[in-house]
Image: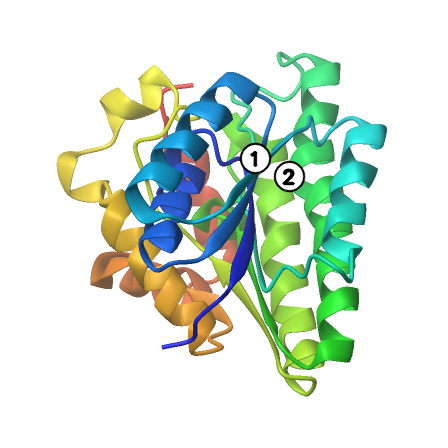
Amino acid sequence: MTTYRTALITGASSGIGEEFARQLAARGTDLVLVARRGDRLEELAGELTRRSGVDVEVVVADLTDGDDLRRVERRLEDPDRVVELVVNNAGRGIEGSFTGSDRDDQEQCVALNVVALLRLTHAAMAAMVPRGRGGILNVSSIAGDVPTPTAATYSAAKAFVTTLGQGIHYEAAKDGVHVTTLLPGFVKTEIISEGTHASVPSFGWVDITALVAEALRDVEANKVLSVPSVKYKVATQVLQTLPRAVVRFVSSKVDMGA
């Protein structure tokens, strides 16, 4: 098992990011936790330090703000405080018809899910390649394979993340750096709307603890994609083999509770 001495996690104040923090701390990995909600980060940092004895650095940052984003980039580039694993988990959903959704919200979705992830991945990879070691785990979504009328911008943003990760995986691998893209299915986190909670059957949800454990194994093994559970592995294979016209037609008929 690869031992990462320090990991930086974005969106660490809740949900998948918080679970990554808990599992990495239990392994003895020092943490840099990044999110907008400083109170939650401080509470989590104190708990993890007491429980696991790891060092936890809190970085309060809104990654859609240019100054805050550059501050996190500089943290990744600091040669005196090396980060060995980056978990780009911060993201936001947006639901509703394209023209019925606020234009600024659409832009913020792209700024966080695409621009911030792109810049932090670039900063991390540029720092790791000369060292010949490191891991980058980008959290995408199966939604990136399914153009969804009620979440078109979110699906498009995640399609970018999935394609980017697959492209740079091979570029990084020759220098000893692992780049893995995580494609979670439905996980009960704060960005999931009440409508989606109501419309997804019980068998469609993925256990967050198992999801994160598998994702960490996959980045250690240098897998291109990490897809949790057998059911979603099958689903992604089906999506990749079906004609795109069929995928578009089916997704246009599905109401995810937006």
Q: Earlier in the sequence, mark 1 or mark 2?
A: 1
- Residue drawn where x is 63% and y is 74% of the image: 169
Quadrant housing residue 131: bottom right
- Residue drawn where x is 49% and y is 27% of the image: 41
Q: Amino acid at mark 2?
A: Asn
In the rendered view, does 205 fall on the left or right side of 247?
left
Which is nearer the eye, 159 or 18?
18
- Asked if one can make out residue 96 in the rendered structure from this viewpoint, the answer is no
Residue at image mark 2: 113
Which is nearer the eye, 84 or 45?
45
**Is there CB contact under 8 Å for labels 1 and 2?**
yes
- Residue drawn where x is 49% and y is 46% of the image: 55
Which is nearer the eye, 181 or 59?
59
Residue at image mark 1: 91
Percent position of residue 146, x then y: 49, 47
Q: Residues within 10 Å of mark 1 (few under 14, many from 20)?
A: many
